[in-house]
Amino acid sequence: TLLSNMGVNAVDLVPGKYFDIEAFTSADTGLVKKFWADHGIEIVGMQSLLFGLGDPSIFDADGCDVIATRMERLCILAEQLGSKVLTFGSPKSRVFAHRNRDTSLAQAHSLFVRLDEMAANHGVVICLEPNPVDYGCEFLTRTSDADAYVAELGLANIALQLDTGAALMNGESADAVEIKAAVGHLHVSSPGLGGVPSVQPGLQEKAQDLLAHWGKVGSTSGHATIEMLNPNPQEPLLAIVRAVDFLKTNLS
């Protein structure tokens, strides 16, 4: 009721919080979709896609098989829920470790070609998200990296995920990145998934600048969603109201 009353009309889901990924049925997805629809809210995206898998690597064949198996299930799930986009983050699955870099990049490319075909078969788009080094990531850590990589891939169902929290952690300015790739979705977040807007000095203004620029960029989902942990366990609803107000004020 709170979200509906505030005019919220779209939400991202963490699928593992709602479903057994390996065993969900159309009846399961129908119930969840109806719950949100009854409140006037559309399920537009999903995130935390590889949670519970133990960080399979995009840089080796076995890891890619594990990822592809999970993503096939999630693409089916997204199709049934009407979700348009799936945000692919998973920073610890993007660590080179001891692997040869050229071989690793070739393996990752093959995976994304595979995922592109999978996504196309189910009418969804997979969005590659920049994950900062502070999250333990070694590949596509900045918005410009992810943008260039998605543009180079040139795959119709692989798009760029924009994330204000990642940009703020990296110290990226609003006008520093000229977006060339197709954008799938936008997350409004703060460093470390803290409250939105960030209470760290200067970051609220920088987030406003990012939204002023990125709000003009069209996306597959057609929406921006808030991504944060609960910054105030004593008053969680107040934190939600504050975040929604910030988004409505700065992204029209």
Image: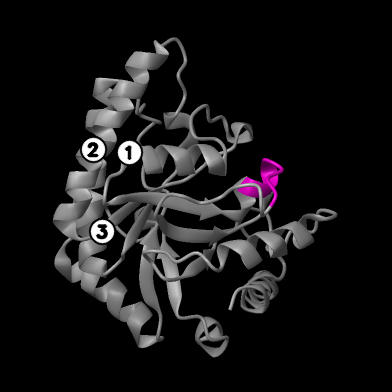
Q: Quadrant of the C terminus?
A: bottom right
Q: Which residue corresponds to mark 2?
A: 113
Badge 1 marks a residue whose secondary structure is helix
Q: CA distance from mark 1 to mark 2?
A: 8 Å
- Give amino acid for label 3: Val
Q: Quadrant of residue 86?
A: bottom left
**25 on left or right of 102:** left
Q: Are marks 1 and 2 in contact (CB under 8 Å)?
A: yes
Whole-angstrom CA distance, mark 2 to mark 3, is: 14 Å
Q: Please, what is the three-letter code of the amino acid marked with disc 2? A: Val
Q: Which one is in front, 50 or 208?
A: 208
Of marks 1 and 2, the one in the foreground: 1
Q: Position of residue 100 (x, y in %)?
A: 39, 10
Residue assigned mark 1: 153
Q: How many marks?
A: 3
Sequence-wise first label, 3 or 1: 3
Would you name the residue on which mark 3 appears? 124
Which residues lie in the magenta part?
167-173
Q: Are marks 2 and 3 in contact (CB under 8 Å)?
A: no
| Scheme by which the image is coloured | one colour
Residue 94, position in %: x, y? 44, 29
> Residue 248: where, in percent of width, then height?
62, 78
| Location of residue 234 (image quadrant) | bottom right
Residue 136's label in the rendered image is none
